[in-house]
Image (cartoon, rainbow, N blue to C red):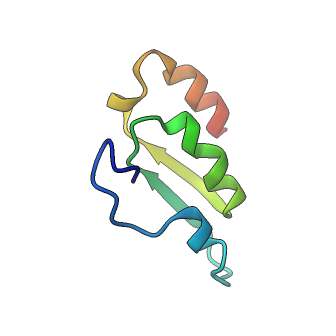
């Protein structure tokens, strides 16, 4: 959550990096600019990312390619 699309009340990628777990982490990105947040989620250990289509605007294909 970025505080723009919805209020920021969550665990941040830098917080997740400190977790020690064998589980695959899935990020639900509730942000106004998902393309800006995707790389941070991968670096934090995300296995999958979910974005809201209404925030993708004209970049839907670009965002999907970036997630893949």
| Frontmost residue, 58 versus 48 | 58
Indicate the quadrant containing the N terminus: top left, top right, bottom left or bottom right: bottom left
Q: Residue at x 68, y 64 (%)?
A: 45
Q: Residue furthest top?
A: 58
> Is 29 positioned to the left or the right of 6 in the image?
right
Indicate the quadrant containing the C terminus: top left, top right, bottom left or bottom right: top right
From the viewer's perspective, is residue 40 above or below residue 23?
A: above
Locate residue 48, reporting x and y percent.
58, 53
Q: Residue furthest front?
A: 3
To which quarter of the image does residue 22 belong? bottom right
To which quarter of the image does residue 32 belong? top left
> Is 66 positioned to the left or the right of 5 in the image?
right
Locate residue 33, reporting x and y percent.
46, 35
| Frontmost residue, 9 versus 61 | 9
From the viewer's perspective, is residue 44 above or below residue 30?
A: below
To which quarter of the image does residue 31 belong? top left
> Is 40 positioned to the left or the right of 58 in the image?
right
| Frontmost residue, 64 versus 9 | 9
């Amino acid at each position: 959550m970025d505080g723009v699309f919805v209020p920021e009340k969550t665990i941040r990628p830098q917080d997740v990096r400190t977790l020690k777990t064998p589980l695959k982490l899935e990020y639900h990105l509730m942000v106004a600019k998902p393309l800006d947040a995707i790389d941070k989620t991968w670096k934090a250990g995300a296995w999958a990312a979910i974005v809201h289509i209404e925030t993708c605007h004209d970049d839907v294909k670009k965002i999907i390619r970036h997630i893949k």
